[in-house]
Image: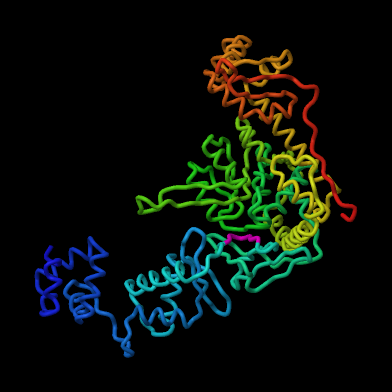
Amino acid sequence: MFLRELEPLVAEDPERLVSTEAVLSFAAVRRGDPITWQHWRRILERYEKAELLDHMLGVPLPLDHGDGRSCAERLIGLAIEAGIEFFHDPDQHGWASIRVDGHWENYPIRSRSFQLFLLRNYYRNTGNSPGAQAIRTTQELFEAKALFDGEESIINLRVADHRGKLYLDLCDRAWRAVEVDAEGWRIVNRPPPRFHRTRGSRPLPAPERGGGLDELRRFLNVDHQGWTLIRAFLVAALRPGVPCPILVAKGEQGAGKTTACRIISALIDPRSGALRGVPREVRDLIAAAKNSWIVCFDNLSHLPEELADAACRLATGGGFGGRELYSDHDEAIFDATRPMVFNAIPDLGAARPDFLDRAVIVEFLEMKPEMRRDEAQFWREFEEIRPRILGALLDAAAAGLRNMPNVKLDQPPRMADFALWISACAERLGMKPGEALTAYQNNLTETHNLALESSPVYEPVAELAKEGFSGTVTELHARLNSMMTDSARRSVRWPKAPSALGSALRRMATNLRAAGIEIQFSRADIRGRRLVSLVSVSEPRKRPSVAVSDHQ
């Protein structure tokens, strides 16, 4: 109220701006009402009272650099002279591409790394520190330029798809990347798509030509189908934005699962602490996906339903939302697809058919004592072949881009984009025509069987389907209850209510049809009832086949 009365009097007596009551009012407004404070700040500057008031409020005066400019103005000028480009991502976050030692790097304007760039650049030119207030002012101005003047650009993590070409960030000091198209691959100094690096990202070796994936075979303790699925997963991880199945490493303790997970990460997305522990909540899974391209979890014995649902969304592409930090109204959105690796001793996800539909399960073989090797020697040998293995994977990706227009599936399976891609890359992966798809289909059959075997309702449903059933879920629940023993009905896994049975059957519907049991959920009949019908068909549904051009 005092400032409202003061404003019309300032023109005739500017000294009122530094009266005791005015200074106390300005101190309160500066803390509690930034918009009003900015209005009065402009008035103070107009009457040349801003620096005096800052002194009275305890704000340090800006250093005099001899050119009449403030620290913030000098900091902004030096940053622009060093070479800087502003843009924003689709989520309206400001970014800066900065020129560092002859190459370009990308950082969020609000990040600690960009602050350090400003500080380093200022100190190299002046020998002084600009101060925290000057850095904040510079970041706010650059953020505004990025949002309102800069172009919108997708920011990529490790891999990118840009105008029909694939890019793999090498994460080296020169910020180089590998460009892949139908003609082959090459290393480029400034790739067209923009990348960013997260804490823990480690560089890939420069890929070499002339290698083959067969060199990797001796480092993985799996059978032929497992070897085929791992190769398919590796080449699928090079193509962003396309659903990628979850690789589940399964086997007894000491079978080499953890080592295989480290190898998979090291070939495409090496990072410190590549293998993570059990995520406690969905937020932990999102944090892992934000900071790494291949998300690896080690030694999982159980996956809660909420996390299994989140993993399914992350595998096929989906959004996650939450309240923006320090905000009551803004929502932080994360929408992405990630290749994931789960290392598990038991049958992880056995009770989640939708999880298994998105998984490729690789069984690791027993590791006999005479097969074990010295770990240091093992990794030295792997590092020797890593550049050639990476080159071979890039060759397969180039072949996939070349062959994709000629590959068609008669009956696409679940994760059809993955099936198309591995079929297009199969020849350069060292596979026979159709071998990759056959291995994937065999895996789907195994996951269907695993989901059914783990469900307590499968056997009674299969028995009932032989004679046929049509009725409400309540009637079906009563019928199944009559077929089970008291101990089976008391089991925690047995659905205690018709609604629980209906949910379980909907989750199992795909698995039941694959096993030759046709299940249908129909709309309400003339009496307003919703019906479910079960019938056993003669044979399970046929597997899809792949059609390949004569040229391929």
Name the image quarter holding the C terminus: bottom right
Residue 148 horizontal side relative to residue 545, left or right: left
What residue do we see at 59% from left, 26% from top?
A: 504
Q: Residue most toward the bottom?
A: 66
Q: Which residues are magenta?
A: 156-161
Instruction: For residue 171, say whether it is visible.
Output: yes
Q: Residue most toward the front?
A: 526
Looking at the picture, how far across and down is residue 297, in whole percent? 58, 45
Instruction: For residue 18, say whether it is visible.
Output: no
- Most foreground residue, 521 or 478: 521
**Is residue 222 shown above or below 291?**
above
What residue do we see at 61% from left, 60% from top?
A: 158
- Most foreground residue, 37 or 324: 37
**Is residue 312 shown above or below 421?**
above
Residue 175 horizontal side relative to residue 546, left or right: left
Residue 214 horizontal side relative to residue 274, left or right: right
Looking at the picture, how far across and down is residue 169, in whole percent? 63, 64
Question: Residue 345's image quarter?
Answer: top right
Colour pattern: rainbow
Magenta span: predominant SS is strand
Q: Let me know if residue 106 is in the magenta part.
A: no
What residue do we see at 32% from left, 87% from top?
A: 65
Q: Let me know if residue 159 is in the magenta part.
A: yes
Looking at the picture, how far across and down is residue 48, in whole percent? 20, 82
Q: Residue most toward the right?
A: 550
- Most foreground residue, 262 or 287: 287
Total residue callouts: 0
Looking at the picture, how far across and down is residue 294, in whole percent? 61, 52
Name the image quarter holding the N terminus: bottom left
